[in-house]
Image (tube, rainbow, N blue to C red):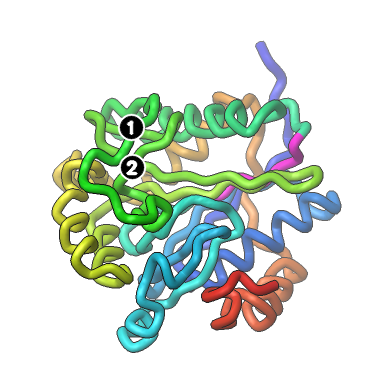
């Protein structure tokens, strides 16, 4: 029998703004790198609804920023890559640890697949059959710039699908000695709203009709017969069981919370950061 290591932290920070959520993930990443905080698994939600862009995306190729502002939709960047996501009815997650951690050590692909396998086990405890994808390309007429496609219109290798449709979108980024993986588990509809704010309106209307062919959410699969609380509990148990770790439920430290608030002012809430990835 494997001995569990009581070294990991589990956070459920509930509903917060996109600016706060992205800033807090970065602050936790810094704290883990400095060994001021233990490896951390965090679950969170979004209030109000918002759009996040992948770290390297060019805003003017993806969304109409002024329209988002006029409609009261928050827009910011993720520290990780990937494509644009409209956040509403979902459980988001982040995993932050050292690159050489024996639970995840290896290549980006190996770490990604290990985390996806854990998520898959937790989701399957709801009574569905989710699997890891081998990767599928967008089969519709592609945008002129494929990077402008929304996240949930294509599936990468090791992302989680049900009946061939994407349920979880994830992205990982590595730094000198740490990694951050972020992702969205769709619990209901709403993510397709990204098409309402895309730069190319003609292409957006075409793509909006394809979301049901390429993606799916838990409410649609289970006819609404599940609770966010149960899903969070299953996910926590899956991390503990598959990684043989003991998760200590906690809350961000005062230093982390202050750091997140500072980063919102310094970067995540700035128009220049959103439009041009200015640092």
- Regarding mark 1 in the picture, which secondary structure is present there? loop
Q: Earlier in the sequence, mark 2 or mark 1?
A: 1
Residue 132: quadrant of the picture = top left
Give neighbour class at mark 2: few <14, some 14-19, many 20+ (Cα, 10 Å): many
Rendered image: mark on residue 157: none
Residue visible at 29% across and 58% down in the picture = 191
Q: Is residue 169 above or below residue 73?
A: above
Q: Position of residue 98 (x, y in %)?
A: 76, 40
Q: Residue shown at 23%/42% (left/top)?
A: 214
Quadrant location of the N terminus? top right
| The C terminus sits in image quarter | bottom right
Residue 90, position as x, y percentages in the image: 36, 55
Can you identify the residue that label 2 sits on? Answer: 154
Please say if the residues under marks 2 and 1 sit with CB atoms less than 8 Å apart. Answer: yes
Return the residue at label 1: 136
Magenta stretch, residue numbers: 94-99
Could you tell me which residue is drawn at 67 percent across and 29 percent down?
Answer: 107
């Amino acid at each position: 029998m494997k001995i569990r290591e009581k070294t990991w932290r589990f956070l459920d920070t509930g509903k917060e703004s996109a600016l706060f959520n992205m800033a807090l993930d970065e602050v936790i990443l810094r704290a883990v790198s400095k060994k001021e905080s233990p490896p951390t698994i965090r679950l969170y939600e979004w209030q109000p609804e918002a759009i996040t862009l992948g770290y390297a995306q060019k805003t003017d190729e993806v969304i109409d920023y002024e329209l988002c502002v006029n409609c009261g939709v928050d827009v910011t960047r993720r520290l990780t890559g990937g494509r644009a996501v409209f956040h509403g009815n979902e459980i988001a997650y982040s995993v932050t640890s050292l690159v050489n951690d024996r639970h995840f050590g290896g290549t980006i692909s190996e770490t990604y697949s290990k985390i996806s396998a854990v998520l898959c086990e937790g989701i399957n405890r709801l009574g569905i059959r989710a699997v890891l994808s081998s990767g599928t390309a967008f089969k519709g007429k592609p945008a002129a710039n494929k990077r402008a496609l929304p996240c949930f219109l294509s599936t990468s290798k090791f992302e989680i699908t049900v009946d061939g449709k994407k349920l979880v979108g994830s992205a990982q980024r590595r730094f000198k000695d740490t990694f951050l993986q972020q992702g969205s588990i769709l619990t209901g509809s709403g993510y397709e709203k990204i098409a309402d704010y895309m730069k190319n309106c003609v292409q957006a209307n075409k793509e909006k009709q394809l979301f049901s062919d390429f993606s799916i959410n838990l409410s649609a699969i289970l006819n609404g017969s599940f609770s966010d609380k149960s899903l969070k509990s299953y996910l926590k148990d899956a991390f503990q069981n598959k990684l043989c770790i003991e998760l200590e439920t906690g809350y961000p430290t005062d230093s982390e919370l202050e750091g997140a608030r500072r980063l919102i002012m310094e970067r995540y809430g700035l128009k220049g950061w959103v439009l041009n990835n200015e640092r």
